Image (tube, rainbow, N blue to C red):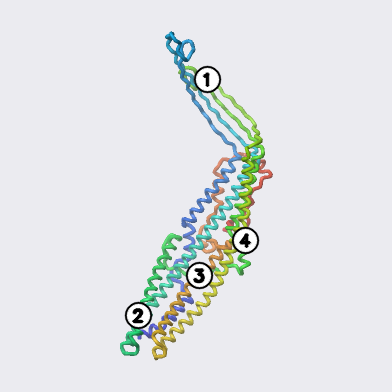
Amino acid sequence: MNGRRRTGLPLLLASALLTPAVPALAETLGEAVALAYESNPTLQGQRASLRALDETIVQAEAGYRPTASLQATVTTDRYTQNALGLNRPIPGVNIPPVVGETQTSGAALNLTQPLYTGGRVAAEVGAAEAAILAGREALRGVEETVLRDVITAYADVRRDQQDVTILEADVGLLLGELDETRARFGVGAITRTDVAATEARVAASQAQLEAARAQLGDSRAAYAALVGRNPGALAPEPSLAHALPANLDDACERAERNSPLIRRADFTERSSAAKLVGAKTQTRPTLSLQATLGYSGGQSGFASPFANYSHDITASAVASFPIFTGGMTSSQIRQAAETNNADRIGIEVARRQTLLTVAQAWNALRGARASLAADEAQVTAANIAFEGSRQEARVGLRSTLDVLIAEQNLAAAQLALTAARHDEYVAAAALLGATGGLYAQDLSPDATPYDPKVNLRRVQRAWPWSPWTPAVAAIDGAGTPRAPPSPPGGADHR
């Protein structure tokens, strides 16, 4: 009777694998993505690094603004001399020395306003702007890496949970088979060898189950490290088919337009180009206005050093013309030129690496889809073979070994199917990431987007502004290239 109740178990399990059910109140991939997007330390650290990079443009723009310094001194001069005004003794003359003291003090307020730096400040601002855009693409690359890791961890846990369920059912099935085999042995229908073979298969399945449980524990730990909490019951992953490219050419086109690796290399080259301009500006003259408001005073004896003050005000226009720097400027220009050349080559390196990654991801997805279709067919066929072997064994047409082999093939097919589903989904996510199309908001609409522009606007408003700064920037930036705005897509997709 137990054997009749167990007859449909493999078929039901295979059906569940082919059409997975949604657990009640299960955690979704969108929830995992939203939590990781808010709390993952790798992502938080990269955002902090970008905020630190935002300060470079404030530091560069400070070159347009006036600077002020205050210097104050108090000096005391105490001296000893004889009555004749000499500070050394006179042989044979015993005259008491005279002790004196002089105190002076002064304060000066120095103001400097650059008018023209030869384009140096404009080049520094352009380099900072391009570096910040490159930093945003670096952040987007880290975001995509974290999202792929979360998706992989989620799929790993789902696969391992299903593997444990399959193997638990397999152990239960084999224990039932063992009871039936022993009963048949007791009536002389089979030999002791058949019982031993069944016992060996039960032990192997139990060992496989324990290994699957250990693997599930590892996957749960990896999930918790990324997401910040342990996984519970996980719902099936949402389909990514609507976001995937139609063919390899479409995937490559998307990658060349949106890949954070390529865009970061492009902005890095623009930053080094601006630094090259900055190095060349060292050969140009500079002009600035300087003003000093000074106070000074002094008093002989022990009176206050702050008595008898006088003050003066000076203003000057200072022009500087570089003539000879011992070869330093020429060397720095050559160094900046080669750095820019390396960054320009780096764009092509990034493009080729990205296209290679896209091609590998596309081929992996194609292979995973083919394997998934084959494994689904294999589960159906293996289930039919197992059920047929059991029925034929009861009438003496199959041996116990034939049944055990069919059962082992069914369990292997079921495990292969869960692995194929896992691999197909992970490959789809990898392809989206390689093309630059993996965003947290697409997977989890409730995730609050992180906008790096907010911090940049905040730090730029936090510093003093002078009404003539735009005019100075316009004069200094004449003929100096600036980093162009970010093209559509990439980090601006929010």
Across the whole image, how many numbered discs are drawn on residues? 4
- Label 2, label 3: how far apart the Cα atoms are: 33 Å
Which amino acid is tagged 4? Glu
Is mark 1 in CB contact (under 8 Å) with mark 4? no
- The quadrant in which residue 225 appears is bottom left
Q: Name which of mark 1 and mark 2 comes first in the sequence.
A: 2
Is mark 3 in CB contact (under 8 Å) with mark 4? no
Which amino acid is tagged 3? Asp
- Label 1, label 2: how far apart the Cα atoms are: 111 Å
Residue nearest the observer in this picture, 412 or 102: 412
Which amino acid is tagged 2? Glu
* Label 3 sits on residue: 423
Which amino acid is tagged 1? Asn
Q: Secondary structure at mark 4?
A: helix
- Dot 2, how many residues are within 10 Å of its Cα: few (below 14), some (14-19), or many (20+)? some
* Label 4 sits on residue: 256
Q: Secondary structure at mark 2?
A: helix
Q: Name which of mark 1 and mark 4 comes first in the sequence.
A: 4
Q: Name which of mark 3 and mark 4 comes first in the sequence.
A: 4
- Label 3, label 1: how far apart the Cα atoms are: 88 Å
Front: mark 2 or 3: 2
- Image location of residue 73, percent across then percent down: 50, 27
* Label 2 sits on residue: 199
Against 279, residue 38 (above or below) is: below
Q: Secondary structure at mark 3?
A: helix
